[in-house]
Image (spheres, rainbow, N blue to C red):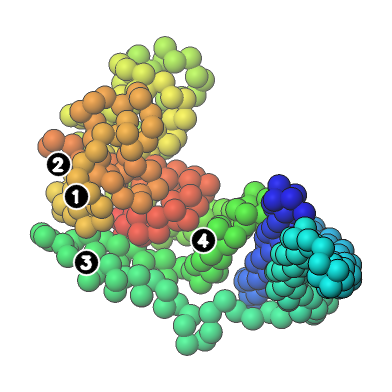
Amino acid sequence: MVAKKRKDITREVKSLEDKGLEASQRALEVADLATKAEKTLKALGSGLTTEVEQTVNHSSQQIQNSIGAEYKTVTHESEQSFTQLEKKKNAFEYAISADREDLSELNQLRKISENKQINGEYLQQAENEKLEEIRFLADLVDSIESTQVKLQKISEFKSKRKALESDYAAHDLYSEDKKGTRWTDQRNSFSEREVTNTKNHIQVVSSGASLLRSWEGYSQLLKLGEFYRETQDEAHKYLLKKQINDLLKKQINDQMERLQKYLFEIREDRVEGAKYSAKTIKIDESIKSIGIEGLEQKLIQYTQEVFTLFGTTPKLQEFILQDPRPWAYDNKINIGTYRDYKSTIYHEIGHFIEFSNLSIKKAAVDWIMSRATGTEEKLSQLTGINDYKDDETAYPDHFFDPYVGKIYSDGWTEVVSMGIESFSNPSMMTLLFLNDIEHFYFILGLVK
């Protein structure tokens, strides 16, 4: 067998082995993902209303169906590889048997040639080639058998998967002695960080966590978030990410709608004052040039909502339109032309809330510095967005948006404004909660 042919055979066998092992590993991980999904989503419906429980069960079934289809696909790929490797092994073993017969005949011919004093070098060379070919094929057989042992493990998990499909076990993600401890662990870790100045930011974050614990949907929300974060890496590998994300985010959005309603209920004492303060803010004639009917009333409504949740700020006196990009400065908010005016108003009033309270400003700066993973970098480099000016910088960290790490030359930040903007609707609250739970607690801490 020529060297080139051996390389081709080796490459072909290696490709089949790799394909089979990859499919087998994917199948095992998908099965594990299915177990996690079932345990968590079943636990979510416990103790809730019939309607919510039905929604959770429906979501669970959808996820299981999707996972089941993917599991069958990758299992089939693994079994196909096993079968193809078995055929190769049988062919190699047959070739080895034939080579051994040829080797026996060559050995007899070589002995005859020696007796008759005939030059048998070519026979010796043929024997050596056959021996080398036998060793080559035997090594391939050993490699295939080793791979098949690994692939056979999939059958164990197939039976477990069938058992799961027929009788799902509904166990909580947390045991009784661990329930409600996740944030306690995070808070303790957070408190141990080295902070150069005040620890106000820890107090704000802890206050937010305490407020959330006072809400009846607290444990369900945390379990949904925990499951979402745990499944991202696994789900990403299997075309399941979108469906799982959509289903989980819908559940979390529903919880956020309830939480938002709860926050307004507990701050009902601020409503009248918020209404009065919102109506005193001047709306410049330039706003009318935007041409959106009822925009002035909406600006007042959005302002009232922010004031109800986070308190009023006498510094804000006027809404104007001067530049396309929104900003907050002096006693004015330039609403810009981004069109999503609700999130814009929430964001820019967030600046005024920080302007009006130096302890909040201090807490925001200290929070950034306690998390920063390096020195300031250009926002254009951190975000990949070239619209930022060269002098716009931010401290890097795993914030939900790099812009959160920005500290202005006068010490103001984007922590409060970006966080309060996220509280303008349940979907944005969900994104903040899933991507930076500390920041989520920080903003909740400003409500209390």
Question: How packed is label 3: few (under 14 Cα within 10 Å), some, or many (20 or more)?
Answer: few
Which of the marked residues, 1 or 2, is nearer the chain's N terminus? 1
Pick the front one: 198 or 334: 198
Please give the residue where the numbered disc 2 appears in the rendered image. Answer: 411
Check disc 4 and give the amino acid type: Arg
Check disc 1 and give the amino acid type: Val
Estimate the spatial distance between the alpha carbons at disc 3 and disc 2, rounded to whole Å: 22 Å
Residue 386 percent across, percent down from the top left: 35, 25
Closer to us: mark 3 or mark 2?
3
Estimate the spatial distance between the alpha carbons at disc 4 and disc 2, rounded to whole Å: 33 Å
Closer to us: mark 1 or mark 4?
4
Pick the front one: 278 or 346: 346
Residue 131 percent across, percent down from the top left: 74, 67
Answer yes or no: is residue 352 visible: no
Contact, mark 1 vs mark 2 (Cβ under 8 Å): yes
Please give the residue where the numbered disc 1 appears in the rendered image. Answer: 365
